[in-house]
Image (spheres, grey):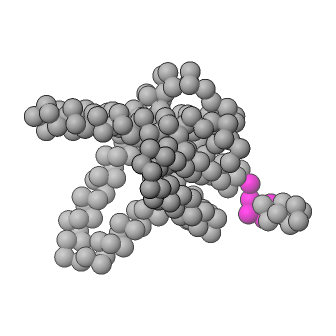
Amino acid sequence: MELTRRHWWLGPLAVAYVGIFVGAGLFASNLGIDLLGSFLVTIVMAGLVSSWFVMIGHVVRSGRVTAADIQGSWFVHLVDVVTFGFLLWALREIGAIAFAELSYVAIVFELALLVFLSAVPEQIYLGSESGAAIFVESYRFVAAHWVEWLPATTALSTLVVAAMQIPFAPLAVVATGIAFAFIFISRGLLFLELTTSSRRAREFQRRFAG
């Protein structure tokens, strides 16, 4: 919470990034060229996601980030984000074809993707792998730490839903952005803790702390 308080401006930044993405989508729709418009929106989205990952990564690793770090952040993880998006699209297309007449299996397949790829953001900006290996590492991470990871990340995600329910729209937008920043910072810190210590060591620390 302290890191989010000190970097409260990440909330409005998240809102601004969403606004840029929506604006890019509207601009692309007016081009009248589906392929070019889709390519434009994909690159803009990947650049925004890359920048966000860089900003959160600075906070998680060093506890400090400034607006100056935005410069150049658009391209740091651009390739990995685009690669992930393409491979996820391909998996879903394959699933749609394979389970076209098995609706329940298709739902299970989508849930499996949601669960086992839930650590992809952290794998991109905190992990050491790239490309398709990110999928494998996310699966391994969730399989090894699902007891700690899934309940915590699920609980955190409800904060955005709660913030969006605020009746005063301007306040809801700001609160949603700050909640989004808090969620990503918390996820990143949890990811680092889980990947840099054993379960036995964490249990010992909790008992030692009382």
Report the predominant secondary structure element of the magenta stretch.
helix
Q: Relative to 193, is 48 on the left or the right?
A: left
Can the viewer see residue 96 in this picture?
yes
Residue 51 is a magenta residue: no
Q: Relative to 59, is 25 on the left or the right?
A: left
> Which sits in the foreground, 34 or 108?
34
Question: Which quarter of the rendered picture does the C terminus lie within?
Answer: bottom right
Which quarter of the picture shows residue 98? bottom left
Q: Relative to 37, is 77 on the left or the right?
A: right
Residue 126 rendering spot, x and y as whole percentages: 58, 42
Q: Residue at x 11, y 34 (%)?
A: 33
> Which sits in the foreground, 19 or 45?
19
Q: Residue at x 32, y 72 (%)?
A: 107
Which quarter of the picture shows residue 203? bottom right
Residue 209 rendering spot, x and y as whole percentages: 88, 61
The span shown in magenta is 197-201
Q: Residue at x 21, y 32 (%)?
A: 27
Residue 157 rendering spot, x and y as whole percentages: 51, 59
> Which sits in the foreground, 108 or 13?
13
- Rendered view: 186 above or below 58: below
Number of marks in picture:
0
Can the viewer see residue 117 in this picture?
no
Residue 199 is a magenta residue: yes
* Residue, far left: 32
- Rendered view: 121 above or below 162: above
* Residue, far front: 168
